[in-house]
Amino acid sequence: MADASFITRRPVAHRGLHDGNKAVWENTLSAFEAAIAGGYAIECDLQYASDAEPVVFHDDDMESLCNIKGDVREKTSGELGLISIGGTKDKVPSLKALLKLVKGRVPLVLELKGREGDDEGFASAVLETLDGYEGEVALMSFDVWLLEELKALESPYPVGLTAEGVKESDFDIHRKAMAHGLDFISYNVMHLPNAFVSEQKARGIPVISWTVRTPELKAHSDAHVDQITFEGFTPEASAA
């Protein structure tokens, strides 16, 4: 298993340190630069552009962030790099642009946004883009087929399960995912504590939460897992 302990050292800025899409929008280079300045790790989302390049974007559809109807996967990374987010100077960044900006200054937690049956080459493209990057990186997804592929490709970076749920049936699904040798977990803070997370922590698996939006919710998270993924407030940044 890969060492994922670094993801617990400092709070993780959810889609960068944005301001709720007022002036600094989520998943933009401006939000990532703000997170770096604050000393936070960065969480962001990866989609798979039509030219087989990973790009930083959360939604499948572009309308809410770019005021353009259409599937982000039907655009090339070059086309996306010309499209404004929220009418700001920020454009949809590629993973390459993110890595060029961060340069190892803070850890990256990258969530792959998969589509079952339409992800051929996605995992390998992410690993190829990361090859040679000198910085701490963790990869995660809700989508077990992508996690399986990352492990099959012998990802040199920690691979984690993004998850939620409070039912035993949920936990059974998560346990099957963890059986692929996953290295960490990111769990819905509103579903803590629970038996699955407790048993995985007892195994020594690092666990972070998502998405923490108040100091009170941070206190709740801190009582049960190792670190927070946050937005909407600025927790103290610390790194061991």
Image (tube, rainbow, N blue to C red):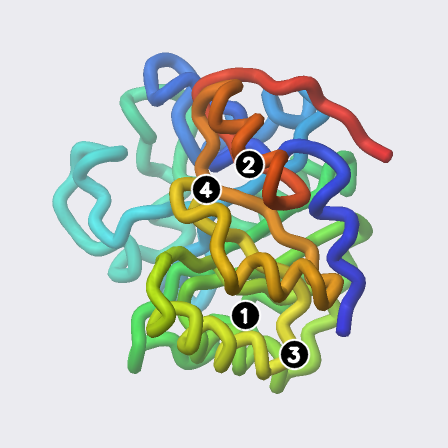
Q: On the image, numbered disc 3 is attached to which residue?
A: 181
Mark 1: few/some/many CA within 10 Å (<14, 14-19, 20+) = some
For badge 3, the amino acid type reads Gly
Q: Are marks 4 and 2 in contact (CB under 8 Å)?
A: yes
Q: Position of residue 237 (x, y in %)?
A: 71, 23
Residue at (54% x, 28% y) in the render: 218
Give the amino acid type for the residue marked by disc 2 in the picture. Ser
Q: Reading the chain from its start, which is encountered first: label 1 or label 2? A: 1
Residue ID for mark 4: 189
Disc 3 versus disc 2: distance between alpha carbons? Answer: 25 Å
- Sequence-first disc among 4 and 2: 4
Res 125 label:
1
The answer to whether 20 is drawn above or below residue 158 in the figure is: above
User: Which circle, 4 or 3, is nearer the viewer?
Assistant: 4
First in residue order: circle 4 vs circle 1: 1
Q: x and y percent of residue 233 in the render? A: 50, 17
> Which disc is residue 62 wearing?
none
- Estimate the spatial distance between the alpha carbons at disc 4 and disc 3, rounded to whole Å: 23 Å
> Which residue is the site of mark 2?
221
Residue 120 seen in render: yes
**Which of marks 1 and 3 precedes in the sequence?**
1
Q: Amino acid at mark 1?
A: Ala
How busy is the neighbourhood of tag 3: few (under 14 within 10 Å), some, or many (20 plus)?
some
